[in-house]
Amino acid sequence: MPLGLRSLVTINGITASLIEHAACKGIGRGTLLSRMRRMGTDDPLLLLQPATPSRKPKPSPSLKERIKYVLGTKAGKLATAKRLGDYASLIQTSP
C-alpha cells in the first residue's frame, strides 16, 4: 500500500503520521515529497534515512602540503618570486 504524508506508520514502537516522523528527524515536507517521488512510497524507513552516509572526517592538509599546492599555482609562484626578490628578473625575461 503506498504511503502518503498523513499515513500512520509505526517506527521503533512510535505510531505517528509520516510527516511527523520526518519532522522529528529534521526532514522537511518538500524533501520528503521529493524522496517519495524518487524512491517510491512503500518503505517509510527508506524515506526517513539520512540523506548521506556518515563519513570519516578528512584530516586537514599539513603545512608542507599547503605550501606545495600554493607553489603549484601561478599566483603562488609570482608571490614567492616577489618575496625572494626575483620579480625584476621575471619581468625582464618575459616577452
Image (cartoon, rainbow, N blue to C red):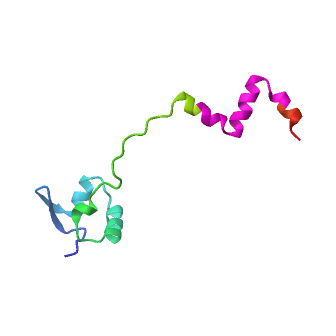
Residue at screen point 76% across, 27% down: 82
Question: From what the image shows, is residue 33 above or below residue 85?
Answer: below
Question: From what the image shows, is residue 39 above or below residue 91?
Answer: below
**Rendered location of residue 16, percent (x, y):** 16, 61
Q: Please say whether residue 68 is one of the residues in the magenta stretch.
A: yes
Q: Please say whether residue 39 is one of the residues in the magenta stretch.
A: no
Residue at screen point 61% across, 36% down: 69
Q: Which residues lie in the magenta part? A: 67-89
Q: Is residue 74 left or right of residue 29?
A: right
Which quadrant: the N terminus?
A: bottom left
Direction top: furthest residue: 84
Residue at screen point 21% across, 68% down: 6
Which quadrant: the C terminus?
A: top right
Direction bottom: furthest residue: 1
**Rendered location of residue 61, percent (x, y):** 50, 34
Magenta span: chief secondary structure: helix
Residue at screen point 22% across, 59% down: 20
Quarter-of-image position of residue 50:
bottom left
- The residue lying toward the viewer, choosing from 59 and 27, is 59
Q: Is residue 92 left or right of residue 11?
A: right
